[in-house]
Image (spheres, helix red, strand yellow):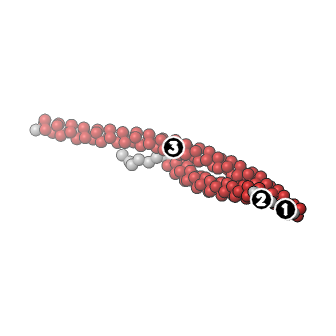
Amino acid sequence: MAGFRFSLEKVRSYKASLEEQLKLQLAAARRQQEEEEKRLEHYRRLRTCRQAIQGELRAGDLLQEAALLEALDSRIAGQQEKVARVRLAVREKCDQVQVAMRERKVLDRLRDRQLAIYRYDLAREEQKQIDEAAGSRCHRCASE
């Protein structure tokens, strides 16, 4: 009997490599998400520090402070949008990884079933050969 060969091994291998690529992309997306969230937190900290200024300010300083606060608010809003986009990208990559894992696992289960059938048939064939050898030996012993 020939050795076991899974007919869809190339497809299973392709799905496994696709899954690995998607996992790498997911990891990169998560790193980018962390960076963008850190940047957002940095802008928020700058904003809260600017609110702590106390004392008398000249009109020019007050206008400059207002412009700075407005610029920080604008950066915070833009950064929040970036964070939202990156989070969405992470969710999409995560979904893609889950789909790829399910597809590969289906092929793995099919391969395991076919391997179990192959091993069962192999064991039956071996038992048949053992039975034939024992039968011919008994037949020789009986004829002597």
Local crowd at mark 1 within 10 Å, few (<14), some, or many (≥20)?
few
Quick check: 49 left or right of 142? right
**Residue position for label 3:** 105
Q: Are marks 1 and 2 in contact (CB under 8 Å)?
A: yes
Q: Nearer the viewer's eye, disc 1 or disc 3? A: 1
Q: CA distance from mark 1 to mark 3?
A: 67 Å
**x and y percent of residue 19 in the render?**
56, 50
Please tell me which residue is depicted at 36% across the width and 46% down the height of the picture: 1
Instruction: Report which quarter residue 38 is drawn in.
Output: bottom right
Quick check: 53 left or right of 39? right
The mark nearer the N terminus, 2 or 3, is: 2
Please tell me which residue is depicted at 52% across the width and 48% down the height of the picture: 12
Q: Amino acid at mark 2?
A: Ile
**Residue position for label 1:** 57
| Numbered tag placed on residue 68 in the rendering | none
**Residue position for label 2:** 53
Please tell me which residue is depicted at 13% across the width and 38% down the height of the picture: 141
Q: Amino acid at mark 3?
A: Lys
Q: Nearer the viewer, residue 83 or 25?
A: 83
Q: CA distance from mark 2 to mark 3?
A: 59 Å
Classify mark 1: helix, strand or loop: loop
State which quarter of the image contains the C terminus: top left
